């Protein structure tokens, strides 16, 4: 198989994940890195045996056909636009962009340039979530009529040395963690039709509890607690609770209630874990772990196949087929997230303007074909 040359834009923590895991996959080769901090880019380049160069040089390089945008969320739109204008395929870290208008513009630009656009998260390609997809598609729990999702914790200031961006516009639990949950829901149930929500900001400051800024207060300027109702085009109604103001809770990550049973899914921020199911009159039981390649622990304690979405996109370019972590899916999720933010602020129920197809499932053979 031919290989697509990849350039990484942004050399923060997540870049290590891509650089470590990209060699697992066919069709992709990271050849270049760039960052506003040239010293950081040079360190990454030396460690991983790739070249370090300016962004302009990367976008002008003939051997870079696709870029992976790992910059901070506020920069996603501008950097992705610049790369698309240079004729590169673009795969972005989540969130894809921070507004529907930005996403629509990038989608139109990619189409005009004849290049692909994609975005993480790719964790829905994991063995657990594809197993749940197969259960739903086989009709084992009937039609999904309702469900719950919970993203609960008390923020990042205890462990993150610079948590500021989590607590300002562009951050918060919806834009930070929402992509994992909402993308998985869309791949399972299809597009969202309508959103309602309420929101609040109970803590106006956060105190950093580690690192060189230990004890410093960070202002909170974006809501940190949301209760949303998502009405899907297929009729399902899902309650989403997302909060960084919770010390402890006992909610499962994701539960789906069907006409023939209930399905319990693990954390959509990860690739592999146990899926559970209950039939009428029966107990909740673990489903047998599948032999799906992205169900297997590959890091000692967990299955981690991040970069799978970018690799699937690269291989799709080479094979002339649709890619799963595609721009339409990412755009729809952005609209859902920003609509939750707006509904929480205004109290309005909002109808979605965008829609998308469910991405193709990634079966065991499909996943194996992505791997070296």
Image (cartoon, rainbow, N blue to C red):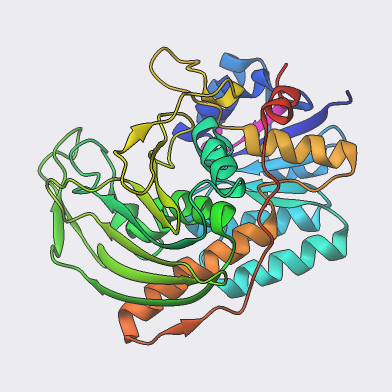
What segment carries the magenta color? 30-38
184 left or right, relative to 323: left
Q: Residue 118 location, x and y as percent?
A: 68, 50
- Residue at (45% x, 66% y) in the render: 337
Q: Position of residue 122 (x, y in %)?
A: 57, 41
Q: Is residue 239 magenta?
A: no
Q: Is residue 124 left or right of residue 237?
A: right
Q: Quarter-wise, where is residue 148 in the image?
A: bottom left
| Left or right: 202 in relation to 312 | left
Quadrant of the image containing the N terminus: top right
Q: Position of residue 334 (x, y in %)?
A: 53, 64
Q: Observer-nearest residue: 8 or 96?
A: 96
Report if residue 202 is visible in the image.
yes
Residue 57 appears in the picture as rendered = no
Residue 31 position by quadrant? top right
The quadrant where residue 270 appears: top left
Numbered marks: total: 0
Figure check: 276 above or below 2: below
Task: From this view, report whether residue 319 is shown above or below residue 259.
Answer: above
- The residue that appears at 52% across and 27% down in the rendered structure is 17
Q: Residue at x 22, y 63 (%)?
A: 220
Tell me: 156 left or right of 78: left
Residue 40 picture location, percent across and down = 50, 29
Image quarter in which the C terminus is found: top right
Residue lying farthest to the front in this orientation: 281
Task: From the viewer's side, name the closer residue of 11 and 93.
Answer: 93
């Amino acid at each position: 198989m031919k290989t697509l040359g990849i350039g990484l834009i942004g050399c923060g923590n997540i870049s290590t994940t891509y650089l470590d895991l990209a060699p697992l996959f066919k069709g992709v080769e990271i050849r270049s890195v760039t960052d506003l901090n040239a010293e950081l880019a040079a360190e990454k380049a030396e460690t991983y045996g790739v070249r370090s160069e300016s962004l302009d040089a990367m976008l002008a390089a003939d051997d870079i056909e696709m870029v992976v945008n790992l910059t901070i969320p506020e920069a996603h739109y501008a950097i992705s636009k610049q790369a698309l204008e240079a004729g590169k395929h673009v795969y972005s870290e989540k969130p894809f962009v921070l507004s529907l208008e930005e996403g629509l513009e990038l989608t139109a630009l990619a189409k005009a340039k004849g290049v692909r656009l994609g975005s993480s998260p790719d964790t829905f390609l994991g063995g657990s979530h594809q197993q749940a997809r197969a259960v739903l598609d086989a009709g084992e729990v009937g039609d999904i009529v309702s469900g719950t999702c919970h993203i609960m914790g008390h923020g990042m200031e205890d462990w993150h040395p610079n948590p500021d961006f989590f607590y300002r516009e562009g951050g918060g639990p919806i834009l930070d963690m929402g992509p994992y949950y909402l993308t998985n829901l869309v791949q399972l149930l299809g597009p969202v039709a309508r959103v309602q929500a309420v929101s609040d900001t109970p803590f106006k400051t956060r105190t950093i509890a580690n690192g060189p800024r230990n004890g410093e207060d960070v202002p909170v300027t974006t809501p940190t607690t949301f209760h949303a109702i998502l009405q899907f085009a297929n009729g399902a109604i899902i309650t989403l609770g997302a909060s960084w103001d919770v010390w402890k809770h006992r909610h499962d990550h994701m539960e789906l209630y069907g006409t023939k049973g209930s399905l319990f899914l693990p954390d959509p921020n990860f690739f592999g874990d146990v899926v559970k199911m209950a039939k009428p009159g029966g107990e909740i039981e673990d489903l047998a772990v599948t032999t799906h390649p992205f169900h297997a622990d590959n890091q000692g304690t967990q299955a981690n196949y991040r970069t799978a979405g970018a690799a699937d996109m690269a291989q799709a370019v080479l094979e002339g087929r649709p890619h799963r972590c595609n721009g339409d899916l990412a755009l729809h999720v952005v609209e859902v997230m920003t609509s939750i933010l707006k509904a929480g602020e205004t109290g309005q129920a909002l109808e979605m303007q965008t829609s998308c197809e469910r991405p193709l499932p990634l079966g065991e053979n499909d996943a194996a074909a992505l791997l070296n």
